[in-house]
Image: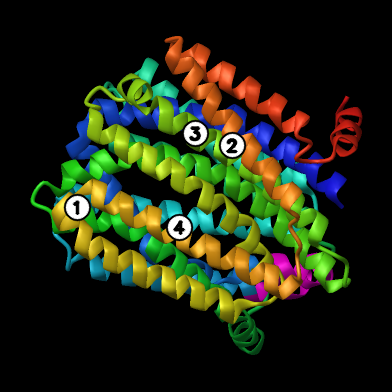
């Protein structure tokens, strides 16, 4: 199972690394530099606001569907009709709630225009994720990997046309940026729907209220998890814009670093998309999940620690290259958010395991605690420290929740981490720090420093045998 996980993970990450950085560092960054922090901050606040209630679209069904279908492949064909009906009804409900509550905000006319199209995009994305959950549950991971980048790849192509060809007589602005994503998502949805239906043995559309009610009763714990986690992930950007006189500018400053933090989370999220069906299947068959849990944890910790250490030591060089208005405050926000990424990456392993194991009440309690802590810290820190205050709130919340999740998983599944295993991770982290200090001492340029530290990280990972070398060797032979 570990071999299967590594093989599919390699393909999934490769596909995303070829596309997502182009979107984040190319198109998205271009839009912010063209718009400036105030206008982009207004967009970021609306974007986060639209996300606050997007769980209404899903109602926890995607994760529930993924878990159940990975245990019984006939679940897809027997419940697809009910799920699609629920999603259609909840889409209408989501539009009503989001638009209704938007009138109680201080959004201007331009922000309302953004909101309407972002709502459409989230509805399209939700249906894509449902059809992808079917494909992943059938363990067609390579197809799912390609679909995971399809919308971004199409959006990049459309945005490049706007930037270099100017088909509408103007360069890429925020509204064109949103329209390009809408078109890309619509095409991806049609493709995902076609693949999912073709891989399903039987599918017959019908409206059955009894089955729909049963589905909602079974999936509501997943929905509560989604609501709570969305709130403490997305509230900060909206609160910054609404609570401060210079809220749009501060939200734009926060968004500059949050974009990179969010991009890193996308890579960690890929682990969860693979782990949920694998964990669910193994727990259902009463197989040991210890080796897979450790493999995923060590891989994700090694990658996230590398990102965090590089971000901490070279933020002052990186941020001015990425953003025209960057200063020391931008760098500090970036450092703290990227260190938080280590904690978030662990929640994608241990939170996923709690979900797969059906420990939803425990997960909900942890998520509710995270929301209370994050909300309280934001209310206290944002008025005084602005965007930096929201950053500290994220930092504290993520490490607190990650620590509790790891602790509860160790207790529930009786996982044993030896002193030797933990020491290896500590040695790896120390090696990264020393390499960064060496680069600073000898005044290497940014590109050379990033390449040197990454190479040292890879060598340390192998030399310390963080994952058994025979497993790495078997994996490489399989790929070659």
Task: Residue 291: give x, y in percent of width and height.
Answer: 82, 55
Between the residue at mark 2 and the residue at mark 1, the CA separation in whole angstroms equals 36 Å
Question: Which numbered disc, 2 or 4, marks the residue closer to the eye?
Answer: 2
Label 2–label 3 contact, CB within 8 A: yes
> In terms of secondary structure, what is the magenta stretch mainly?
helix
The mark tally for this picture is 4
Between the residue at mark 4 and the residue at mark 3, the CA separation in whole angstroms equals 17 Å
Q: First in sequence, mark 1 or 3: give its number.
A: 1
Is residue 7 shown above or below 17? below
Between the residue at mark 1 and the residue at mark 3, the CA separation in whole angstroms equals 29 Å
Q: Residues within 10 Å of mark 3 (few under 14, many from 20)?
A: many
Q: Residue tagged by mark 2?
A: 429
Q: Which residues are magenta?
A: 65-82
Dot label at residue 398 = 4
Q: Residues within 10 Å of mark 4 (few under 14, many from 20)?
A: many
- Label 2 sits on a secondary structure element that is helix
Residue reaching furthest left? Answer: 245
Looking at this view, is 372 or 438 the one in front?
Answer: 438
Residue in the image at 80% along x and 60% along y: 290
Q: Residue tagged by mark 1?
A: 241
Residue 342 counted in the magenta span: no
Q: First in sequence, mark 4 or 3: give its number.
A: 3
Q: Residue tagged by mark 3?
A: 309
Looking at this view, is 104 or 415 the one in front?
Answer: 415
Q: First in sequence, mark 2 or 1: give its number.
A: 1
Question: Which numbered disc, 2 or 1, marks the residue closer to the eye?
Answer: 2
Task: Residue 409: give x, y in percent of width and height.
Answer: 67, 68
Q: First in sequence, mark 2 or 3: give its number.
A: 3
Q: First in sequence, mark 2 or 4: give its number.
A: 4
Is residue 395 shown above or below 370? above
């Amino acid at each position: 199972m570990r071999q299967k996980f590594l093989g599919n993970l390699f393909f999934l990450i490769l596909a995303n690394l070829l596309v997502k950085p182009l979107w984040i560092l190319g198109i998205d960054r271009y839009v912010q530099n063209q718009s400036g922090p105030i206008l982009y901050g207004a967009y970021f606040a609306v974007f986060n606001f639209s996300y606050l209630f997007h769980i209404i679209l899903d109602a926890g069904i995607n994760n529930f569907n993924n878990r159940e279908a990975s245990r019984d492949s006939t679940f897809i064909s027997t419940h697809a009709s009910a799920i699609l009906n629920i999603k259609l009804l909840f889409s209408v409900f989501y539009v009503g709630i989001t638009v209704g509550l938007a009138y109680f905000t201080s959004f201007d006319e331009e922000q309302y225009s953004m909101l309407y199209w972002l709502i459409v995009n989230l509805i399209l994305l939700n249906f894509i994720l449902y059809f992808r959950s079917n494909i992943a549950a059938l363990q067609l991971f390579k197809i799912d990997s390609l679909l995971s980048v399809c919308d971004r790849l199409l959006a990049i192509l459309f945005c490049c046309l706007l930037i270099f060809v100017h088909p509408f007589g103007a360069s890429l602005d925020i509204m064109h940026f949103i329209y390009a994503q809408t078109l890309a998502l619509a095409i991806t949805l049609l493709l995902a729907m076609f693949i999912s239906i073709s891989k399903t043995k039987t599918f017959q559309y019908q409206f059955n209220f009894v089955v729909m009610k049963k589905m909602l009763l079974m999936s509501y714990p997943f929905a509560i998890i989604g609501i709570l986690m969305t709130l403490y992930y997305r509230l900060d950007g909206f609160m910054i814009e609404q609570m401060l006189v210079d809220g749009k500018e501060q939200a734009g400053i926060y968004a500059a670093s949050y974009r990179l933090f969010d991009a890193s989370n996308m890579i960690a999220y890929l682990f969860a998309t693979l782990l949920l069906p694998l964990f669910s299947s193994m727990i259902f068959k009463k197989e040991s999940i210890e080796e897979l849990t450790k493999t995923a944890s060590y891989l994700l910790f090694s990658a996230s620690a590398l990102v965090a250490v590089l971000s901490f030591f070279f933020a002052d060089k990186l941020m001015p290259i990425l953003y025209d208005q960057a200063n020391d405050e931008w760098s500090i926000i970036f450092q703290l958010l990227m260190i938080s990424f280590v904690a978030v990456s662990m929640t994608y392993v241990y939170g996923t395991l709690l979900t797969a194991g059906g420990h939803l009440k425990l997960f909900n309690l942890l998520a509710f605690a995270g929301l209370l802590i994050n909300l309280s810290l934001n209310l206290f820190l944002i008025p005084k420290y602005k965007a930096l205050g929201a950053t500290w709130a994220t930092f504290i919340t993520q490490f607190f929740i990650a620590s509790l999740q790891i602790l509860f998983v160790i207790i529930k599944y009786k996982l044993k981490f030896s002193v030797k295993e933990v020491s290896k991770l500590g040695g790896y982290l120390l090696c990264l720090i020393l390499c960064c200090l060496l680069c600073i001492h000898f005044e290497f340029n940014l590109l050379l420093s990033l390449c040197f530290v990454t190479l040292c990280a890879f060598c340390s990972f192998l030399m310390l045998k963080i994952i058994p070398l025979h497993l790495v060797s078997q994996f490489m032979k399989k790929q070659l």
